[in-house]
Image: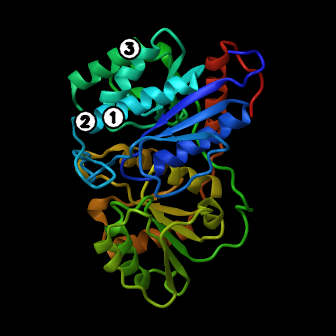
Amino acid sequence: MSSQAAPRVFFYVQHLLGIGHQARAAAIARAMGRQGLDVTYVSGGFAETRFDLGGATVVQLPPARTADATFSTLLDAQGNPVDDAWEADRCLALLEAFARTEPDALLIESFPFGRRRFRFELLPLLERVRGQIPVAASVRDILVSKDDAKRTRWIVETVNAFFDTVIVHGDPRIVTLDVTFPGADAIADRVRYSGYVAPAPTVDANGNRDGVVVSVGGGAVGGPLLRASLAARPLSSLSRAPWRLISGPNLPESDRNALKLAQGVTIDTYVANFNEFLCSAAVSVSQAGYNTVMDLMTSRTRSVLVPFSQHGETEQTVRASLLARRGLFQVLSEADLTPNALAKAIDAAHAGPPPHPNDIDIDGAAMTARIMGELATGSPISGRL
């Protein structure tokens, strides 16, 4: 690497269902750009929503998505299940992009803790770079808990074989990796906590607030919460306030058609300035995805969390429970989701204090950029972003 060249980071991101992984990865890409790194952002998912990547060079691989929330079937751009030929073509495209970039460090989102379905391309990439440049994994605060000793052993072996660093985007004062990953002790020497990746409020979070906003992330599994919210509105003390539903770009058409809007209710597919919008809402109703919770905390919006828990998903339930214990949010389980229960939770949130991340590290994007800068240059970078 030339002494005059910006350190180059090759950042692999594969989202499958929602948009949370993209939003967090985009915030990290922007922070790496501010750190002075030359970022190549490699996307393996569909680009339904455009995120600000801070000037990163984008490489779009042949896109894949999951058929449903079971994550059991991968579909290509034409909606067909992927086959061996598709996998071989995509692996070649990834390796060629890497060779063109000649990066100084590699950052892989989720893998090997998640996205194991993409071993067909990531293991060849890791074999190629082993011993050549530093490699880091980017993982969220809470993993999906699985009682599978063979899977845990494979993850530990893969980390120890190929990865220099595992960047956990959380605060160990809230939750440590071992809570949801039983192999954490075996990779403890590689784990670094970045803090939570959270946006800065773009407007005054203490300004005037009115109405209820209901959001469901990407929307793929948001239909039940949207319908319950509409039915809860007449039962809430905020029934006369404006309600705005944000369905997400992936809400199934059948769920969209089932939404019966009343006077005073509006619906949008996507809101680019979500954090800014939350700063003007009296109450938020949402699932408990990573990025949504960060938006709620930084915007100080009183909230009801209804964590997604279908198909064995535990991540959102664990996160919501931990934050509810700190008095930050009202939580209603999917099993208890009825219009009456939701209305009561909305009223309780409205009457309670706003959340505030007083003792939670939410500078995770900047710290991740600093870590990647250290890896790419081989020396510590002084100061914080």
User: Residue 85 — which label?
Assistant: 2
Horizontal relation, residue 368 to residue 237: left or right: right
Proximity of marks 2 and 1: CB atoms separated by less than 8 Å = yes
Horizontal relation, residue 184 to residue 8: left or right: left
Q: Is residue 381 above or below residue 207?
A: above
In this rendering, does residue 325 appear at all? no
The crowding category of the residue bearing disc 1, from other C-alpha atoms within 10 Å (few below 14, some 14 to 19, many at least 20), is: few
Which residue occupies 52% across, 71% down?
213
Picture coordinates of residue 156 (x, y %)? 34, 18
Measured in 3D between alpha carbons, the distance from the residue under mark 1 to the one under mark 3, in whole angstroms, is 35 Å
Residue that mark 3 sits on: 186
Q: Earlier in the sequence, mark 3 or mark 2?
A: 2
In this rendering, does residue 82 appear at all? yes
Q: Nearer the viewer, residue 332 or 256?
A: 256
Q: Nearer the viewer, residue 136 or 8?
A: 8
Measured in 3D between alpha carbons, the distance from the residue under mark 3 to the one under mark 2, in whole angstroms, is 36 Å
Amino acid at circle 3 = Ala
Q: Earlier in the sequence, mark 1 or mark 3?
A: 1
At mark 3, the secondary structure is helix
Residue that mark 1 sits on: 89
Question: Which mark is nearer the camera, 3 or 2?
Answer: 2
Which of the image's four quarters has the N terminus? top right
User: Residue 197 — which label?
Assistant: none
The crowding category of the residue bearing disc 2, from other C-alpha atoms within 10 Å (few below 14, some 14 to 19, many at least 20), is: few
Picture coordinates of residue 49 (x, y %)? 50, 57
Which residue occupies 65% across, 12% down?
378
Picture coordinates of residue 376 (x, y %)? 63, 19
Question: Which mark is nearer the camera, 1 or 3?
Answer: 1
Amino acid at circle 2 = Ala
